Amino acid sequence: MRFVCRLLALVALLFGLVTIVTGTRVLAGSDPGYPVYQPLLVYNVAMGFAYIAAGVLAWRSAQRGKRAALAIFALNLVVLAAIAWLYSSGGAVAPESVRAMILRTSVWLVLFLGFAWAGRRAARA
């Protein structure tokens, strides 16, 4: 199970790094090809650092990784609901942003479920 937890932690770390790099590029002026909702972009870059912190915690402790993944999933779900509402009401949120937030939220749900599964398996052993 340690291998699975380490693999999940690496996914969290890499996902955080990619989030920071891509978000920072857009903040610096790179055009992603669709309108950018600035508060969402800033949130995502900040969360990239949280993703890395969660990956470090998960590397050290699957239980802490599980808690961090649940917290990040919950925060992303709230933000997803908010931007989905903004998009559906004609706000300045691009459909690409909604899809990207669905991806982020889904990744963190899978990470949470993976840590929970690994924790249960390790407890049985």
Image (tube, rainbow, N blue to C red):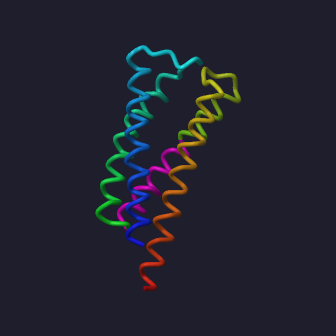
Q: Position of residue 99 (x, y in %)?
A: 63, 35
Secondary structure mainly formed by the magenta segment: helix
Quadrant, the C terminus: bottom left
Quadrant, the N terminus: bottom left
Q: Position of residue 96 (x, y in %)?
A: 62, 28
Residue 51 lies in the magenta stretch: no
- Residue positioned 36% across, 45% down in the render: 50
Residue 73 lies in the magenta stretch: yes
Q: Position of residue 71 (x, y in %)?
A: 44, 54
Residue 86's place in the image compared with 14, above or below, is: above
Q: Position of residue 42 (x, y in %)?
A: 42, 28
Residue 6's place in the image compared with 40, above or below, is: below
Magenta-drawn segment? 63-78
Determine the residue located farthest toward the bottom in the rendered image. 125
- Residue positioned 46% across, 65% down in the render: 115
Residue 35's place in the image compared with 62, above or below, is: above
Front residue of 48 and 1: 1
The number of discs equals 0
Where residue 94 sits, quadrant-wise, is top right
Q: In screen coordinates, is 122 left or right of 96? A: left
- Residue positioned 56% across, 38% down in the render: 101
Where residue 7 sits, quadrant-wise, is bottom left
